[in-house]
Amino acid sequence: MKKVLTIGEVLVEIVATTKGNGFLTEQPLVGPFPSGAPAIFIDQLGKLETPCAIVSRVGNDDFGQLNINRLIADGVDVSAIAIAEGECTASAFVRYQEDGNRAFIFNIKESACGTLDKTAEYDALVECCDHLHVMGSALFSPNTRALVMEAAARIKQRGGSVSFDPNIREEMLNEPGIRAALDDVVSLTDVFMPSVNELFMFTQSACEQDAVPELLQRGIGTIVLKRGADGASCFTRQGRWDAAPLAVTEIDPTGAGDSFGGAFLSFWLAGAAPEVALRYANAAGARAVTRLGPMEGTSNRQELDAFLHEMKG
């Protein structure tokens, strides 16, 4: 089986139990939960028994160990997660607003994963992995961008493949080098996994009907469009497949897109038909929002089969 590598942030998430705008008053909190978009994505792959690994950096603290323990338990190779003495593991405090939007306070840039260095463990994983998954959120750091682009070039040169989930907050687009890095990643991408809004960040077209063919003509083989509560679509040069939304009670949407992407890639790498990969990805994303905590909703195959059966009934 092909082995998947991702590079980027590992953090803990701490969630306010009340709804409101920000953290200007005392709040009861729950957590810490293992988190970080690349970590959630790779955990979902591990849950589906796809060989996988992550390059990251955490502090020598409970938050870092919490993440490492979870990833190991779910089958992820953590050999390239460096433990930085005297530094802190990244964190995010989250509070939901009444309209469902979220307010975050991040400590990532100044944390242990704010600077990833090239290590022997990184080199070893790049040499043994056949696929690289890139999360746009991981490109905030020049060091991380350099590692991602090197890994992508090396893996593609050996005949491997690359998937890309833009997953980028709007304010990050103002960071020096981000726009060019995003365009460079797209040029190497085989499987593209944007949300509807993110689709137009990479095209000259202003509508989906034009944007998708434009990207396919540029060499991307598979486009998986995440529509949130409206389901999802998959496009290749051979056709289009749609997955209808699954009606669930949303508890926590954080990590749903990462779970979706991890599930799709697991089935795609195993040679599943596009409609099969899309069906399981759609189920993984829907099931993820029913659990509190960004990594708590990642699913194994048995859980996804049971969930899909329940949705039919």
Image (cartoon, rainbow, N blue to C red):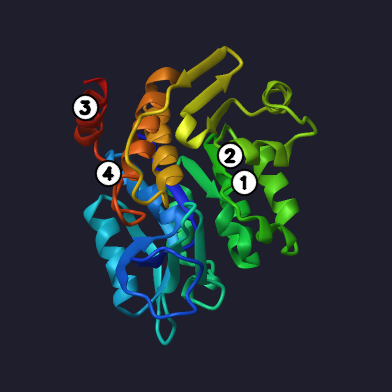
Give the residue at x 32% y 80%.
61
Reading the image, the residue beneath label 4 is 47
Q: Amino acid at mark 3?
A: Glu
Pointer 4 local density, CA inside 10 Å: few below 14, some 14–19, many at least 20: many
Q: Amino acid at mark 2?
A: Lys
Give the residue at x 49% y 79%.
24
Which residue is nearer to you in this view: 159 or 272? 272
Which x, y percent locates residue 271? 39, 22
> Of callouts 4 and 2, which one flags the residue occurring earlier in the amino acid sequence?
4
> Of callouts 3 and 4, which one flags the residue occurring earlier in the amino acid sequence?
4
Between the residue at mark 1 and the residue at mark 2, the CA separation in whole angstroms equals: 5 Å
| Residue 4 against residue 70 in the figure, above or below | above
Q: Nearer the viewer, mark 3 or mark 4?
A: 3
Between the residue at mark 3 and the residue at mark 4, the CA separation in whole angstroms equals: 20 Å
Q: Secondary structure at mark 2?
A: helix
Kindly identify which numbered label has been placed on residue 310. 3
> Of callouts 1 and 3, which one flags the residue occurring earlier in the amino acid sequence?
1
The number of discs equals: 4
Q: Quadrant of the C terminus?
A: top left
Is residue 273 visible in the rendered image? The answer is: no
Reading the image, the residue beneath label 1 is 153
Between the residue at mark 4 and the residue at mark 1, the CA separation in whole angstroms equals: 27 Å
Q: Secondary structure at mark 1?
A: helix
Reading the image, the residue beneath label 2 is 156
- Of all residues shown, which one is farthest toward the right? 204
Pointer 2 local density, CA inside 10 Å: few below 14, some 14–19, many at least 20: some
Q: Quadrant of the N terminus?
A: top left
Q: Amino acid at mark 1?
A: Ala
